[in-house]
Image (spheres, rainbow, N blue to C red):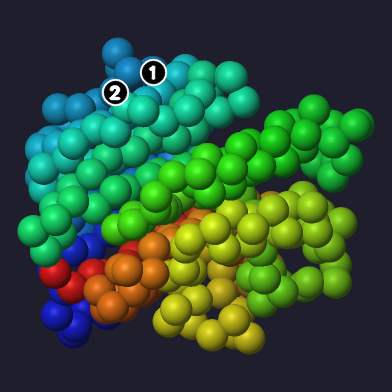
């Protein structure tokens, strides 16, 4: 990736507590020099967001939406951001799972949507598990919202908490009944994506090849077992596919000290 000519580098990362892992954010910035970083699970209320520390890392433009201990999303940028505030209150919960902005690319605005989809708990039954019901309802709402608006020059990123394709998990057969890869989830995520988006990661990595962004903390040796899932995504509208330069999953970050169980995903765009 580093050898390609790029004008805009965007990273998405479920950081799993921004204040706890602020040194890793600095390490990410030094390693990749991204123009924009989208974070999920920041787990910090807005009044305690470390905006000055983030700006000290070179990200002068910062948008965030957070709450204590749970959820939270943020966009950190070296380029000017314009906040997009006309987004829904998903499932009427006000639980800080979506933030959106626009930024200039090739002299014209691009919309950027950063999502943290509910994880859904452990039981893949919406009647027995309210968390799973919430997850399905959230994806349904998002699908409908994007289907009813003109989607052009749009990038959607985030921890969508669903691995939709067979090669997005270490074992399709064994995970069919495990939350994140069940048919009610995968069919919904693909329906959302097919409502006007291209999978930027699979634009570079064929769907028949394994591709993961998350490895459980429960795996003592995550590299040896390699029981991963692709829960983190970057989508673009078709009018931006000719701007795509390259994509990388920063697997090395899974070995950083006290790191997240997710790793950053990087996509480069040409202006």
Q: Residues within 10 Å of mark 2 (few under 14, many from 20)?
A: some
Q: Which mark is residue 169?
A: none
Residue closer to the observer: 114 or 18: 114
Q: Is residue 246 above or below residue 176?
A: below
Residue 118, image x, y percentages: 62, 37
In space, the residues marked 2 and 1 are separated at their CA atoms by 6 Å
Q: Is residue 24 above or below residue 137?
A: below
* Residue 266 location, quadrant: bottom left
The N terminus lies in quadrant? bottom left
Q: Which quadrant, please, contains the C terminus? A: bottom left
> What residue appears at the point 70 percent right and 36 percent down from the top-left corner?
137
Q: Residues within 10 Å of mark 1 (few under 14, many from 20)?
A: some
Nearer the observer, 47 or 10? 10
**Is any part of residue 26 visible from this angle?**
no
Question: Quick one: which residue is furthest to the right in this view?
Answer: 128
181 left or right of 34? right
The quadrant holding residue 236 is bottom left
- The x and y percentages for residue 165 are 67, 70
Q: Which residue is mark 2?
A: 49
Question: Residue beneath label 1, please?
Answer: 45
Q: Secondary structure at mark 1?
A: loop
Q: x, y percentage for residue 260? A: 48, 48
Nearer to us in this view, 68 or 89: 89
Q: At x 11% / y 64%, what residue is drawn?
A: 106
Q: Are marks 2 and 1 in contact (CB under 8 Å)?
A: yes
Q: Is residue 114 visible?
A: yes
Rendered location of residue 86, percent (x, y): 36, 28
Residue at (32%, 69%) from the top-left corner? 239
- Residue 248 lies, with reference to residue 36, above or below; the image says below
Q: Secondary structure at mark 2?
A: loop
């Amino acid at each position: 990736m580093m050898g390609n000519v790029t004008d805009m580098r965007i990273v998405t990362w479920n950081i799993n507590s921004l204040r706890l892992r602020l040194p890793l954010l600095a390490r990410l910035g030094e390693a990749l020099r991204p123009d924009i970083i989208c974070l999920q699970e920041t787990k910090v209320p807005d009044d305690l967001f470390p905006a000055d520390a983030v700006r000290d890392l070179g990200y002068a433009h910062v948008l965030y939406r957070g709450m204590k201990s749970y959820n939270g999303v943020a966009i950190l940028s070296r380029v000017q951001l314009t906040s997009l505030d006309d987004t829904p209150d998903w499932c009427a919960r006000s639980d800080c799972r979506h933030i959106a902005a626009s930024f200039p690319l090739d002299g014209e605005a691009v919309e950027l949507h950063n999502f943290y989809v509910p994880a859904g708990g452990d039981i893949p039954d919406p009647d027995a598990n309210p968390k799973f019901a919430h997850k399905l309802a959230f994806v349904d709402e998002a699908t409908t919202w994007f289907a009813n608006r003109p989607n052009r020059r749009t990038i959607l990123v985030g921890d969508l908490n669903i691995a939709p394709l067979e090669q997005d998990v270490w074992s399709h057969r064994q995970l069919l009944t495990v939350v994140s890869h069940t048919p009610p989830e995968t069919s919904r995520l693909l329906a959302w994506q097919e409502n006007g988006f291209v999978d930027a990661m699979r634009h570079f990595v064929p769907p028949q090849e394994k591709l993961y962004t998350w490895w459980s903390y429960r795996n003592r040796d995550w590299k040896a077992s390699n029981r991963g899932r692709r829960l983190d995504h970057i989508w673009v509208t078709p009018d931006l596919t000719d701007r795509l330069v390259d994509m990388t999953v920063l697997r090395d970050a899974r070995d950083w000290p006290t790191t997240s169980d997710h790793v950053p995903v990087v996509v480069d765009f040409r202006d």
